[in-house]
Amino acid sequence: MNAANPSITNGGFLMESKNEIYNLIPKQYYPHTVFLQKGTPLQQALQQMNKAGLQYPFIAKPDIGGRGRMVSKIKNETELNDYINLVKENFLLQEMVQWEQEVGIFYYRFPDEKYGHISGIVAKEFLTVEGDGKHTMLELLMQEKRFVLQIPELKKVYGNQLQKVLQPNQKELLVPYGNHARGSKFIDASHEINDDLTKSIDEVCQQIHGFYFGRMDVKFNTWEELKQGKNFSIIELNGSGSEPTHIYDPRHSLFFAWKEIIRHWKLLQRISSLNHKLNKISYMSFREGMQMLKADTEHLKKTAEE
């Protein structure tokens, strides 16, 4: 999780395990989560689910992955069984957080400084259609360029329900995941950064061992409560491979994105250098980097076949 050393398991480099990351976070800050090995029998999964107090609906997602791939809302036992039979890797069952707002908060802290900083915030508008009393949900989806690529997957999930005509101003949330690749719109909300929010987020991040740089995806109730450190839940935590996703706001230019990426690379370089000097964390070698790239490529190829 720190900015100078990859995760090493059994002598090999692996992509980040969500379960291992959750284990670094104090339990009060993230949803109830169950880790299951691939191929876990349904009855065993149900036992683990009940032991953790999970109730339908909840979220199922691969332990290793990104871009919303294979993330599903599970509403009943049949859907859970279908998911278990479909997923070909270790996976998580996670409480579905009911707070409606979601943001990605990019945080960094220099190892030689006492307090951390927030460098950007992205707010997420989930894939939602709003009725006009005339067009079907499918027709409404086809009117929005950002939704068109999601239609094949939405047809699998909703089937004939997409032929429903919504009443004027009636809204239907179709994808409850704040992921760009799943149709969410990213809005730069960095104007919400202030001393109260920075203090609240810093207090949480200081409790996560080795976390100096990265983005946390947070669901919350209101901005006022979030800035007070109340009523929020960390649903994802990404380390040094994180993107400053506020760059994907459609209002921003390509030049703005380049500038922000370079700014964050410079922050990462400084943190890595300080970690090497102060905490004696070794740099990744070229050979290790190539091994990690190969493992990542192989994993993406494997999961693309699912």
Image (tube, helix red, strand yellow):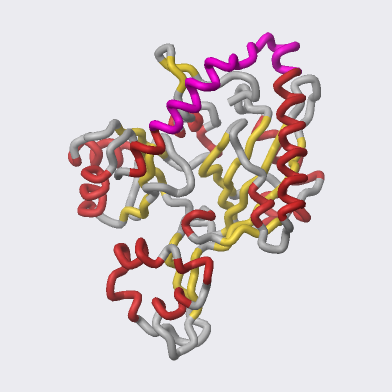
Q: Is residue 296 left or right of residue 219?
A: left
Q: Is residue 288 above or below residue 44?
A: above
User: In the rendering, at what x and y percent does residue 296 appear?
Assistant: 45, 31
User: In the rendering, at what x and y percent does residue 291 appear?
Assistant: 48, 20
Q: In the figure, residue 251 lies in which quadrant?
A: bottom right
Asked whether 77 falls inside the magenta stretch, the response is: no
Majority secondary structure in the magenta region: helix
Residue plotted at (43% across, 31% down) = 19
Q: Is residue 28 left or right of residue 204?
A: left
Magenta residue span: 274-298
Name the quadrant of the N terminus. top right
User: In the rendering, at what x and y percent does residue 162 appear?
Assistant: 35, 75
Q: Is residue 99 above or below residue 244?
A: below
Residue closest to the far bottom: 134
Name the quadrant of the C terminus. top left
Residue plotted at (41% across, 78% down) = 137
Residue plotted at (25% across, 38% down) = 45
Q: Is residue 45 left or right of residue 212?
A: left
Q: Is residue 264 above or below residue 149?
A: above
Count the labels in the image: 0
Q: Is residue 29 left or right of residue 32?
A: right
User: In the rendering, at what x and y percent does residue 77 appear?
Assistant: 22, 51
